[in-house]
Amino acid sequence: MKQLHKITPYTDEVLEWDEKAQQYILTLEYFKNNYDSVFVDDDTTKRRLKENSKLVYRFIKNRVHSRNRPIVHKVINYTQEGRDFIKEMLDTQMSADVQTGYNDLGKTPALNIANGQDLGRINIQQNLVSVETENCFDDSDYYFGFRIGYQASFPPIFFVMFK
C-alpha cells in the first residue's frame, strides 16, 4: 500500500475546508481562474460549488462499503492524497456542470428525445454525477494505492492505521 501523508484539513486558493459540513469545496477564485463562468453571479456560482461538493461527497459515501465509510472519510479529508483526489473529483464535476448544466439534473424535468416523455425524477437522480467524476472515483488506487470503492469491508489493519 502507498504511504499516505496525514494532514489537518485546510483552506488555500484551490480548496476551501467547510468545518460544518466536513468537506472540501472548490474556491470561487479557483473557479473564476479556470472556467468561463456561465452562472449569473458570484452567489449562484458559490451555491453551485457547494451543491457539487455535497453531490460528490454523497456519491462517494454511497459507493463505498458501509463499514468502510469512516475510513474513506478520513482518508479523503485528512491526507494530502485524499485532498488531491477530492480536488480532481470536484474539478471534473464542476467541468461537467459548466459545460452541460449537469447539476440541473434532478431539478428540472428531462425529456426523452426519442418519445418526448418526461424521464421521471428517479431516472434523473441516478445520473447526477458526471461519467468523468465516476471514472476518477474508479481510479482512486492511483491516489491511495488501494480502491476506496472496495465492495467488501477493508482488512482490520486499515481501521488501526486511520484511527
Image (cartoon, rainbow, N blue to C red):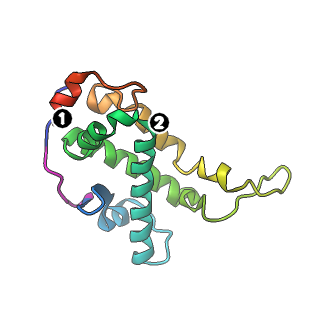
**SS category of the residue bearing label 1:** loop
Region of the chain picked out in magenta, as a range: 7-15
Which amino acid type is shown beneath numbered disc 1?
Answer: Phe
Residue 3 percent location from the top left of the image: 16, 27
- Residue named by callout 1: 162
Q: Residue at x 19, y 41 (%)?
A: 79
Q: How far apart are marks 1 and 2 (CA)?
A: 25 Å
Q: Residue at x 26, y 37 (%)?
A: 71
Residue 83 percent location from the top left of the image: 25, 46
Q: Is residue 50 above or below residue 144?
A: below
Magenta span includes 21: no
Residue 33 percent location from the top left of the image: 34, 63
Count of number-bearing discs: 2
Which amino acid type is shown beneath numbered disc 2?
Answer: Asn
Q: Which residue is drawn at 13% across and 50% down?
A: 8
Residue 135: mark: 2
Sooner in the amino-acid sequence: mark 1 or mark 2? 2
Q: Which of 87 and 63 is in front in this view?
A: 63
